[in-house]
Image (cartoon, rainbow, N blue to C red):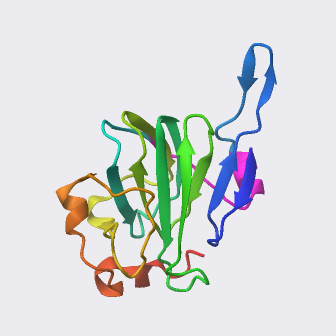
Amino acid sequence: MKFHKTSLLGAYTIELDKRGDDRGFFARLFCQKEFDAAGAPMSAVQINNSLSAKAGTLRGMHYQLPPAAEIKVVRCVRGALYDAIIDIRPDSPTFGKWFGIELTAENRLMLLVPKGFAHGFLTLSDDTEAFYMVSEFYGPEQERGIRFDDPRFNIEWPNTPVEVSSKDRAWPDFSPTFHGTELLRGLT
């Protein structure tokens, strides 16, 4: 795996290191030693899979507060999606900044989302499937979200979302009190 730093502290894109011949190729999607060596320790406790039937489906921007704050490693295994993350760690030099990247079945890129980041994606084609590993179990009491169109962050989505759950539309404008960002101190 080849880890590439993004513009946000602690977030990486991960490129597969393919070993191939005339049969095709082999590549690791996860290796604890390689993640540790890249400074991105990750131990997966869940592996999730989502399918979005329609292009323009938006899922996000989700995160969990401690003690369930999680690292995510996201990959698109069918179709294409635009993945976006926001650094909401109050003591981070990249606090309040966002980063986005296109993940496709063809480019096989992955995105490592650190603890203390909100995460979401917009599907760019029908029947888009995402696969992601997470480092913590789902904690409903710790779940939070930021609206995908919150003007504080002004994420530049490549297309207008057409399918958004009522839950994701209902998140309030960003507020450190509601969003619990004080609890995210020290995650950098």
Residue 58 shown left or right of residue 40 in the figure: left
Q: Nearer the viewer, residue 178 or 120?
A: 120
In the picture, which quadrant includes the C terminus?
bottom right
* Magenta stretch: includes residue 34: yes
Q: Is residue 110 above or below residue 176?
A: above
Residue farthest front in this picture = 159
- Give the residue displayed 64% in from the left and 38% down from the top: 29
- Give the residue displayed 41% in from the left and 39% down from the top: 125
Q: Is residue 107 visible?
A: yes
Instruction: Point out residue 97 in the picture as x, y percentages from the top left corner.
Output: 53, 77
Residue farthest top in this picture = 23
Q: How many marks?
A: 0
Q: Nearer the viewer, residue 160 or 14?
A: 160
Instruction: Point out residue 74 in the picture as x, y percentages from the top left corner.
Output: 52, 48
- Quarter of the view holding residue 53: top left
Q: Is residue 179 above or below residue 23?
A: below
Q: Is residue 45 visible?
A: no
- Quarter of the view holding residue 60: bottom left
- Give the residue displayed 34% in from the left and 53% down from the top: 59
Instruction: Point out residue 112 in the picture as x, y percentages from the top left corner.
Output: 59, 55
Q: Is residue 93 above or below residue 22?
A: below
Q: Is residue 86 above or below residue 17?
A: below
* Magenta stretch: includes residue 173: no
In the picture, which quadrant includes the N terminus?
top right
- Give the residue displayed 65% in from the left and 59% down from the top: 12
Residue 110 shown left or right of residue 173 in the figure: right
Q: Nearer the viewer, residue 7 or 89?
A: 7
Q: Which residues are magenta?
A: 32-47
